[in-house]
Image: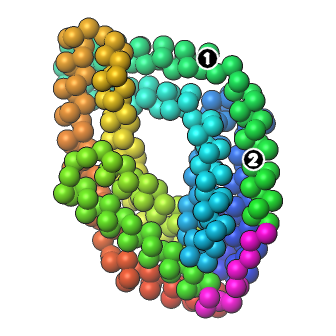
Amino acid sequence: MSYTFRPERAFTGDFKRVGAEQFEQATGMLRLRPDGMHEAIHQARKSFKRVRALYRLVASDAPLFQSQENARIRDMARNLSAVRDAAALVENARYLREGARSQEEERALDHVCLRLVERRDRIADSQTDIEDRIAATIVNCERAMAALGHVAFDDSRRKTADRLAKGWRRTLKRAARALEACQESTEAASFHELRKRAQDYRMHLALMRQAWPSAMEAKRLDAKALVEVLGHLNDLDVMTSLVNEDPALAGNSQDQAYLISAVIARQESLRAEALDHARNVFLDTPDDESRTIRLLWLEAGR
């Protein structure tokens, strides 16, 4: 995979390579669309998430660059989000249906799935300016690549190791605060924050894969599993909010009752599963693990 640092290379050039490849992948997808427009948008947004995680890792050494470019890339993703977010709700409704506890609940969730599919298609049809949005995103990708070309770091081995350790510690401290909040409250915002921090951690593990391939890949897979559980939980919260605003999406009162019951039951099990995963993923203290990262980088670069 190209989304990884090479310890034997100068950090500035390698950092630019990793970021540029993600922008190139995004623009290539948006131009060629090998699997259709909506999948191209989905893949481009994944690339944007990788770049934002990359930039967060070096925020201490390039705070202005990280702040400005994070805002640019966030807005690029939001510009393409409407149809993809609607499609994600359909996928989550189908996921909920797979765990139906009775035939009656399954039928009710079938009805919900159909209504969410219709909503997704309506949103897609209403996006008459989608080509303009895609064209604007490609232009902004090119501008972001130009900004990336101007960034520079101290490439000495120890300075690079210190930079990575500091970014690692920051990621883990934010994750620890989010996990603590989730243990104290079932609020959706707390679990959404934990999801974002787990996403960063998963991507940082990918970036550091070459420092210790087997260990980093094992931890990355654990973090990926956590992100998937938290993603389902977040989508269920979005679905609940949507149905609260527009109850007709859930159908008649009986379908609504089955949906609410299914959501509550699944949310409870997902929260428990997420906390178990998170305690395992974020087992080591931020200080201890960041020191390990520093030492691994120094050794890998010899």
Asked if residue 231 lies left or right of residue 20, the reply is left
Q: Amino acid at mark 2?
A: Asn
Q: Is residue 216 above or below residue 69?
A: below
Asked if residue 296 lies left or right of residue 301, the reply is left
Q: Nearer the viewer, residue 268 or 182?
A: 182
Tell me where residue 205 appears, x and y as whole percent. 50, 67
Q: Which residues are magenta?
A: 150-159
In this rendering, does residue 144 appear at all?
yes
Q: Which residue is mark 2?
A: 140
Q: Amino acid at mark 1?
A: Ser
Q: Is residue 155 above or below residue 118?
A: below
- Mark 2 lies on a secondary structure that is helix
- Mark 1 lies on a secondary structure that is helix
Q: Mark 2 or 1 closer to N-term?
A: 1
Residue 281 image-quadrant placement:
bottom left
- Between the C-alphas of marks 2 and 1, the distance is 23 Å
The prevailing secondary structure element of the residues shown in magenta is loop
Tag shown at residue 126: 1
